[in-house]
Amino acid sequence: MAVVGKIGDIAGFFAAPALQPVLSYLQAVSAPKSPESTRILAMEQNTEYKFGLESCGDFGNPDSRVFAIEQSYGLKSSSQAFYETHRDYVDVQIILQGQELFHLASARDCEILVSYDECRDLVIYRTPEKYSVLHLYSDMVAVFFPEDVHAGGLGLEQLGSQIVYKSVVKVPRLLFGF
């Protein structure tokens, strides 16, 4: 059940008190010339910076830690797609600049290539026979849940060579109440 939209349109999705710091971070990242967006847009291509959002979750409890991965990268072709899901974390992805395509499929319709790696919270899938294509661009947010097989950073053939600047907030699913 992926959720996609502009941050203002899906802000209510983050209404729970435990998710308010996530919403605040997303709003800060999407604000032009904020320290957060300035930091991300200044990143060199193919770099990432990972840090904890200490105001989120209980950092004494590893099951409730929220962190962000700010990154920049060039698009890749669909033949290089990496299909994945996560069991313990929900991916909340926001695009600051650029655009990319995502392939999205239900885990029920996909074949597992590499079984669950608990250390990486990762399941890897073979290329699905059927998938939807999402076109994400500046200020778009995509929320991917454990059943959402997704592959991002795609679109080289359709969108051309470009750099994507984004942040991926990893939110423990228990903060969403499941």
Image (cartoon, rainbow, N blue to C red):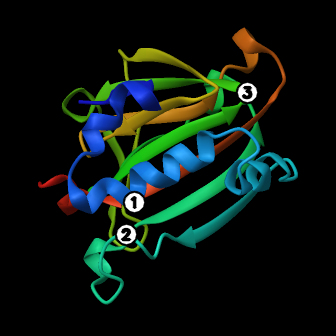
- Mark 3 and mark 1 lie on one chain; the one further toward the N terminus is 1
Q: Residue at x 71, y 49 (%)?
A: 34
Q: Which residue is mark 1?
A: 21
Q: Position of residue 14 (x, y in %)?
A: 29, 45
Q: Which of the image's four quarters has the N terminus? A: top left
Q: Position of residue 58 (x, y in %)?
A: 30, 80
Work out whether residue 118 or residue 25 is closer to the camera in this orientation and state it: 25
- Looking at the rendered structure, the kind of residue marked 3 is Gly
Q: Tags 3 and 2 in contact by the CB under 8 Å rule?
A: no
Label 3 Cα neighbours within 10 Å, binned few <14 / some 14-19 / many ≥20: some
Q: Which residue is mark 3?
A: 98
Q: Is residue 176 left or right of residue 96?
A: left
Q: Quadrant of residue 118?
A: bottom left
- Mark 1 and mark 2 lie on one chain; the one further toward the N terminus is 1
Q: Quadrant of residue 104?
A: top left
Mark pair 3, 2: CA separation? 28 Å
Q: Which mark is residue 56?
A: 2
Label 2 Cα neighbours within 10 Å, binned few <14 / some 14-19 / many ≥20: some
